[in-house]
Image (spheres, rainbow, N blue to C red):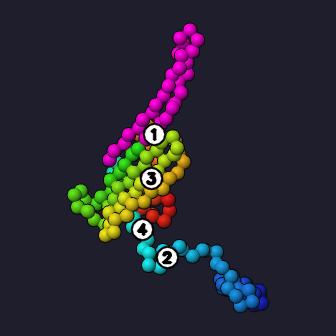
Amino acid sequence: MRHWLTLWLALATASCAEPTTHGARLPTTRPPQPTAPAGEMQAPAIETECVLSAGDSEITTRRSFGPNRALGPTTTLSAGCSMSATCVARQGVQTPGDGLVEVRCDEHGCACRIEVFDARPATRTFSFVAECKDTEQAERLLNERCIPAARHPSHP
């Protein structure tokens, strides 16, 4: 019984030790967190609550006539939308962590624009593929893609 307990303790503590191969350390399962290059600070993040401020959508369609002047199918020529949010702690007072977030989409895709009001104001944009034809879709894209990226600048 004592031999079994000693063996169990040896195995349990061995699994907690860092793995090595002939004295060299093996990489751990958790990769190191990325850091900004020397002399470069990470982009500031929006930390305050965001309130939707403006939205718009437009769609251009064409309807053709068939034989005998009967109406034919409707074809969408272009569609787009936009939505913005204001993120401020207190209206009229600029504080670190305040900013603006916007999404704009057209037939080619969407782009988020994030402007952070900080000691060193920063603006960044990133693009992604999505379809948007109305303000409800624009609001969803703003809430699911742009605002989370504004809160975590290293993750677009």
Residue reaching furthest to the top: 68
The quadrant where residue 97 appears: bottom left
Residue under pointer 2: 37
Q: State the image coordinates of residue 44 (x, y, percent, origin top left).
A: 39, 67
Mark 1 and mark 4 lie on one chain; the one further toward the N terminus is 4
Residue 129 sits above or below residue 22 on the image: above
Mark 1 Cα-neighbour bin, 10 Å: few <14, some 14–19, many ≥20: many
Instruction: Mark 4 and mark 3 in contact? Answer it, CB < 8 Å.
Output: no
- Identify the element where label 2 is drawn: loop
| Residue displayed at 39% across by 46% down | 83
Mark 2 Cα-neighbour bin, 10 Å: few <14, some 14–19, many ≥20: few
Is 60 one of the magenta-colored residues? yes
Is 51 one of the magenta-colored residues? no
As shown in the figure, which amino acid type bears the numbered disc 4? Ala
Magenta residues (range): 53-81
Where residue 80 is drawn, which disc sits there?
Answer: 1
Q: Quadrant of the N terminus?
A: bottom right
Kindly report the distance in space between the C-alpha atoms of the residues bearing marks 2 and 3. 25 Å
Residue under pointer 3: 112
Kindly report the distance in space between the C-alpha atoms of the residues bearing marks 1 and 2. 38 Å
Asked if residue 43 lies left or right of residue 99, the reply is: right
Q: State the image coordinates of residue 86 (x, y, percent, origin top left).
A: 32, 53
Where residue 43 is drawn, which disc sits there?
Answer: 4
